Image: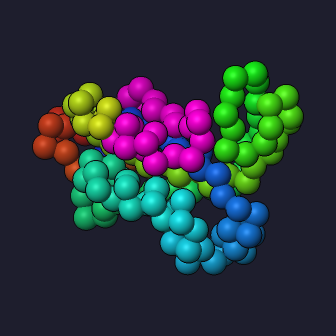
Amino acid sequence: MSVQLNTVRKLRVHWPISAETFTRIATGEASALQLDPGVAELLNTVEQFQDLGDFGNYKHVFESGLGLEGFTCGDGAAPTLGRVGEKTVSPTFVFTTYFDAATENAVVEQFLQELVDIHPWELPVIEVTGPLTVTGGLNSKAHSGAAAS
């Protein structure tokens, strides 16, 4: 089997979770992902877009991590958590997936808008990278010439 290189873009979403969900995930309880209403909504929304996490025979591929998000709300903010002028730290679920770099901008904008619409933060942290190269069988009709030799 040869290594296939594919040009992709990475999508990473930082999603606030409760301390209880954080602990349950950290101890290996994978079902906590679906028990947390916010994370469940994130995962269900992402699954609507076939372009996200499509690695040929593997669909909806994602990576996750746990972390802490820290911020101080400034004047004029309407925070979901914390208060203006106060330092706040929130347990966070970090969701990462990939999509073909040739995906049309309109499709990318559509799934980004859906994520912004369901995100509980006033200003969600959603990262989208420029093209990068990964190994694997990312499925794409528009990207059939991406394999490196």
For the point 58% across and 33% down, the residue is: 123
Tally the marks: 0
Query: Which quadrant, please, contains the C terminus?
Result: top left
Q: Position of residue 63 (x, y in %)?
A: 51, 56
For the point 28% across and 51% down, the residue is: 49
Q: Nearer the viewer, residue 42 or 30?
A: 42
Seen as rendered, the residue at the extreme left is: 141
Identify the image's colour scheme: rainbow, by chain, secondary structure or one colour: rainbow
For the point 67% across and 44% down, the residue is: 80
Q: Nearer the viewer, residue 86 or 134?
A: 86
Asked whether the viewer can see residue 137, the reply is: no
For the point 51% across and 46% down, the residue is: 119
Q: Would you say 26 lies left or right of 58 here?
A: right
Q: Quadrant of residue 145?
A: top left
Q: Position of residue 26 (x, y in %)?
A: 71, 68
Asked whether the viewer can see residue 75, the reply is: yes
Q: Nearer the viewer, residue 95 or 57?
A: 95
Q: Position of residue 87 (x, y in %)?
A: 85, 36
Seen as rendered, the residue at the extreme top is: 75
Q: Position of residue 44 (x, y in %)?
A: 39, 62
Query: Which quadrant, please, contains the N terminus?
Result: bottom left
Q: Quadrant of residue 82?
A: top right
Residue 126 is inside the magenta segment: yes
Q: Is residue 43 above or below residue 16?
A: below
Q: Would you say 46 lies left or right of 119 here?
A: left
Seen as rendered, the residue at the extreme right is: 86
Q: Quadrant of residue 30?
A: bottom right
Q: Would you say 107 lies left or right of 112 here?
A: left
Q: Is residue 122 above or below residue 93?
A: above
Residue 112 is inside the magenta segment: yes
Please state the extent of the stretch shown in magenta in the rendering. 111-133
